[in-house]
Structures are given as C-alpha cells and as structure tokens.
Amino acid sequence: MADNYLTDGYTLASWLTTRDHKRIALLYFAAITTFFFVGGAAATLIRLELATAQGDLVSDDTYNRLFTAHGVIMVWLFLIPSIPSALGNFLMPMMIGARDLAFPRLNLASWYIYVAGGVMIITALFLGGVDTGWTFYTPFSTLFSNSHVVLTLLGVFVVGFSSILTGLNFIVTVHTMRAPGLTWFRLPLFVWANYATSLILVLATPVLAMTLVLLAIERIFQVGIFNPALGGDPLLFQHLFWFYSHPAVYIMILPAMGVASEIIPCFARRPVFGYRFMAYAILGIAIIGFLVWGHHMFVSGQSVYASLVFSLLSFLVAIPSAIKVFNWTATLYKGSIRFSAPMLYALGFVGLFTIGGLTGLYLASLALDVHLTDTYFVVAHFHYIMVGGSVMAYFGGVHFWWPKISGRMYPEIWGKVAAVIVFVGFNLTFFPQYLLGVQGMPRRYHAYPDEFTVLNVLSSAGASILAVGYLLPLAYLAWSIFRGERATSNPWRATGLEWQTASPPPTENFEHPPEVTREPYDYRPEGEIAPP
C-alpha cells in the first residue's frame, strides 16, 4: 500500500487516469501555472509597448491581440479556476472529513474539459489571435473583426463546462459528505466561500455559454441577434455578457476571501471575529453579485433609471465586503501575530482588495463613471481586485498549504522576500494607472500623448519587479520538493481537519474517519494549549 497519494503510482497513466481529488488538483496546478505564464508574457509585451509614448514595439493591431490574449487567458484559464479547481479540489474533501469529492470521475472529466478549452484558446492565439478584447463586444466581434473569434469563443464555451462540473461536484460534496459533528456553522470559511462560488458557477455560467453560442451564430450565419443592421440589439449582448461576467468577479474573489479567512486566524492565534457574519457575508456577496451587472453599462445608452438602480445596488454589495474586511481586522486585534510568508500574502490581499473595493465605489457613482469609464482607472480598479486580491490570496494559499500538498517546507525567508516584492511591484505597476485614468488616458491605446509618459514608465518598471516576485516562488517551491525539510502533519499549528492527517496525506485522506466536536478556529494565544 502507498505511503501517501504522491507514491500511489509513478507512471504518467497513473496520473492521467487518477480519480484522487488531490492528484487532480495537482494536474490543475500544472495547467493553471502554464496558462498563467502565457498570459503573463502577453502582459509583459503590453507594458514594454507602453513604456514609450509612440507605441513603437508592435503595431496597433498586434497590440489589440495582445491585450485580448492577456484578458481571455488570465480570466478564464487562470483567475476563475485557480483557487476553486486547484486549492479547492485538494482541500475541500479533507476540510469536511471526506475521502474524496462526491463524483471522482466527473472531477477528472472537468480537468480534461478545461485543458481541451485551454488548448483551443492557445491554438487561436498561435494562429494569429483575436482582436476584440476579452469582452467580445458586438457588432465588432460579429461583423468587422477578421481574427479567430469563433475558435476563441469555442474555447471559452468548453472551459465553462469544466466550471459547471466543478461547482456541481462541490455543492453535492458539501451537502452529503460532511464528517459527523461538522454542522453548517462549523464549516471552515474556505468551504463556505467555495460553496457560494459553486452556486454562482452553476447558475451564471450557462448564461455565458448561451451568449457565446448566439454570438457565434450571428457571426457565422448572419442571423440578426445583436447586429442592429439585421434587426438585433447590441445592448442585449452587453446585458447577457455582464449578467455572467460580474458574478464572475465574485467567482474569482470569494475563494480568495476564504483563503484569507484561514490564514489570518492561524497566524494571529485568534478565532475569526464574527464567524456567522462572515459566512452570511459570503452568501450576501454571492446573491447581490447577480444584481449589479448594469454598472458596466452606465454610458452604453441604457435607461438612466436602470442605471440609478444598478448604482444603488453596486453600493449595497460593498456592505458584505466591508464586513469581511472589518472582521479580518478585528481578528488581528490583540493577536499573537507571526509575519510568516502566508500571512504577508494574506495581509497584502486585505490591503489591496480594500483599495480596489473603495475605488469600485467611484465607478459605481453615475456622474464619476461618465469621466472614468474606459480609462486606466478601470484597469487599475480591476487589477487591484483580481491581481492584488485573487492572485495574492492564491499565492498565500499555496504557501500556507504547500507543506500539506508536498510534504516539504520551503525556505521561509524566500517566501517573505517574494511576498514583499510582489506587493511593492504590484503597487508600482497599478497605482500610477489610477492617476492616468483620472487624467483621462483611455485604456486599450497602444500610443499616447507625451504627458502620460512618466506614469507609464513607472507602471512598466513596476511590472518588471512584479514579474520577479512571481518567478521566485516557482524556483524555491520547486527546490523544496527535492531539498526542502520534511513537513510535520501540522507545521502551522492550525485547527482545520486537513491538518489532522499526515503530510502529504494518504490516498484516502484519513486513517480513521474524523469526528468534529469543537467550534471552528479554536485558536489560543501563544503558550496556551487548546484541549484535545
């Protein structure tokens, strides 16, 4: 019998046919990391192009294809699946005391579907790419674009099925496979976050799939759905697209909130402040997130009364988000805080997410949005939430659970250095873009007036620092697999069920089925021992 899941078969076939959720999570890690660096390469070229005002590195058409590739790859192939499909797949069953997900074969199928969709998108990129932007706005995408729109749409359409299957699997697993004593309000907040995310995936992704099919039908067969010349309505596309794509923002940020909610109490040695409010806030964000899509369309020509309602609802969704930020802060209060690498990433997440959320309120204001929409202010806001939020939390989660995943410890000092470099590089990259947006620089332009040069050079310099911060973990985590110190079952002295089994875990997760008798996050100050 294998000692752990990593030694349960060494052949390629044993990995590609596995039904073990932990091995499938590692398959997702490998694919997601590959796509992350492809999307990052496109971002590097974008920032090199914008380092000079003349736009003299690539042509305007190539620039359009670069930012489209960056957006499509980062949103659908990295951000949406990163935490749920990689960390979630690995951790969800262990966190609830289960041996696997409810549908192991479906879990493996979701990975194959994800890779198939990703290959289609990358193929379109190598054939010449697509120039519509990641939003595929009509009528440009259906009538005028001469790039590989349909192949890219097909890839995104296929990847969506992977998301639906993963969400369905998580929902059924949480409902039916919890350990004895693990009531709903003893669930870790990471489980709550992925459960709410799964509801959004199952409810919203079919709308995106339907929209992309309609787009392809209009482009191929010239059926008048969105094209006004054929009797269609271009605003209909925007409504359908954003009905999925704004909840998609919460697909990306809710799991990140779950990661922060695991790391902060562990390294502050304090229970989560207001646990029930945190759980309800997660569900509140998921529900209200379905009602705010129209704030992307304030200048599109939709009814001003509809815009007023969407503006109000956009301010409303900030309330549960603020509850979470205040509760993380209260959890830190009087804590015995250790600034380990995962904690630095989690604190960076809280700070950057707060800045991104507050600037979202500016964009939710009708009068301000008229000036700021389609400027670099929107780019900065989006990246503070998605990169400063989701990616920081993803790296924090990888560092936090790496001993459990690999059975090895990484060099702590390098983890801290990488976290600081990412934080500094990120702010230097994206904070100048807020200033560019306020000054009126439009996004998606490959050349710009000379007065914007200094801030763009700062932004490009920051991007080079950020790239170093992202490459460093790749190096020292790979080193740790071969040379790192062996991890104990619970190196962080955390309270979750996943820490009550060996590192790395056995194939069946637990030697004996666990039973839960305590409340979640039962942390004590340094030196005080919790009862067994």
Image (cartoon, rainbow, N blue to C red):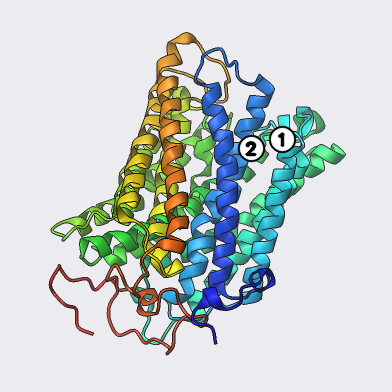
- Residue type indicated by callout 2: Ala
Query: Alpha carbon of mark 1 to alpha carbon of mark 2: how far?
Result: 7 Å
For label 2, the SS is helix
Label drawn at residue 216? none
Quarter of the image with the N terminus in it: bottom right
Query: Residue at the bottom extreme?
Result: 512
Q: Can you tell which quarter of the image residue 255 is in?
A: bottom left
47 vs 315, nearest the viewer: 47
Dot 1 alpha-carbon crowd within 10 angstroms: few under 14, some 14 to 19, many 20 or more: many
Query: Can you give x and y, in whole percent of width and height, for residue 11 in the image?
Result: 66, 72
Q: Are marks 1 and 2 in contact (CB under 8 Å)?
A: yes
| Residue pictured at 60% horizontal, 48% vertical | 35
Q: Is residue 233 left or right of residue 510?
A: right
Total marks in image: 2
Label drawn at residue 69? 2
The reply to whether residue 2 is in sight is yes
496 vs 403, nearest the viewer: 403
Query: Can you give x and y, in whole percent of width and height, for residue 311 in the image?
Result: 43, 38
- Residue type indicated by callout 1: Gly
Question: Considering only vertical position in the picture, is 239 above or below 269?
Answer: above
For label 1, the SS is loop
Query: Can you give x and y, in whole percent of width and height, for residue 171 in the image?
Result: 53, 71
Quarter of the image with the C terminus in it: bottom left
Q: Is residue 102 left or right of residue 139?
A: left
Q: Can you tell which quarter of the image residue 16 is in?
A: bottom right
| Residue pictured at 45% horizontal, 18% vertical | 440
Label 1 sits on residue: 129
| Residue pictured at 47% horizontal, 50% vertical | 474
Dot 2 alpha-carbon crowd within 10 angstroms: few under 14, some 14 to 19, many 20 or more: many
| Residue pictured at 50% horizontal, 48% vertical | 249
